[in-house]
Amino acid sequence: MLWNTWTILILLAGAAAGYLLGSVNFAIIITRLFGKGDIRDYGSGNAGMTNVLRTVGKGAAALTLLGDFSKGILSVIFVRLLLLLYAWASGTPVSSTVLADYIVAYAALLGHVFPLFYHFKGGKGILVSAGCMLILGPWSLVICLAAFLLLAVTTQYISVGSIAAGVAYPIANGLVTWAQTGQIGWLEVCLALPIAALVIFLHRANIRRLLTHTESKVSFRKKQ
């Protein structure tokens, strides 16, 4: 992508929009709509879907999933649309938006984790990351989702599945680019590393609870 004043301004606008959209925390909003107050006052204190599931119920958790996943999608699509509009207006082709895509994805993730509207105390960003990944590289998302489901279902720990998905992301990007081009896309691998590192860092309390066998399990089996 050709960097100039306009494309830098577009990138800044996209990052700002991504952060603000990321700051709209659906776990907090949905829990309040269900009359339960602030989700951060319950359970693990995390403003995320898993805590909503345990505290409020499946319906509220499903709405939280939809909202947080969608804001990841919309953040990346927004900057792509701005760049396409610039390319059309200026007659300058935009060959690749990958760097801009990831920068805006980082902004949306940081907005979710440190939301401007909720005193900078948000969730862990798994669903927002997944929404971004759907646009950044859907096959990488499939691999990460498989890693999540395999570990979450077999261990019954959502946190283990989330950590596994984070670890899998750079690896998935490498595998997908190798399968598509015959070469490992090291740019995509490196750009995925900050997301993976942040996901693991945000689960540090879960890791401590796992080591002390105090982490809460989630059953995926239907109750008889």
Image: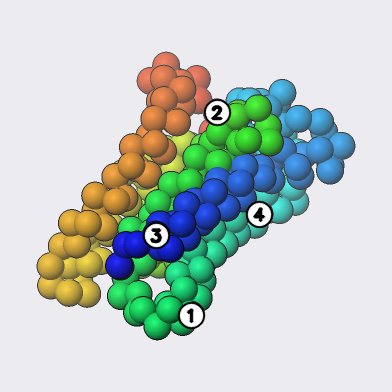
Label for residue 6? none
Of callouts 2 and 3, the N-terminal one: 3
Q: Amino acid at mark 2?
A: Ser
Structural distance between the alpha carbons of marks 2 and 1: 53 Å
Task: Give the percent coordinates (x, y) of residue 10.
Answer: 47, 60
Instruction: Categorize mark 2 by other alpha carbons within 10 Å: few (<14), some (14-19), many (20+).
Output: some
Of callouts 4 and 1, the N-terminal one: 4
> Is disc 4 placed on a helix, strand or loop?
helix
Q: Amino acid at mark 1?
A: Ala
Of callouts 3 and 4, the N-terminal one: 3
Residue at the outermost front position: 5
> Is disc 2 placed on a helix, strand or loop?
loop
> Is disc 1 placed on a helix, strand or loop?
helix
Asked if residue 65 is positioned above or below residue 176 in the image, the reply reads: above
Nearer to me, 34 or 10? 10
Instruction: Categorize mark 3 by other alpha carbons within 10 Å: few (<14), some (14-19), many (20+).
Output: few
* Left-right relation of 198 to 109: left
Task: Give the percent coordinates (x, y) of residue 58.
Answer: 71, 48
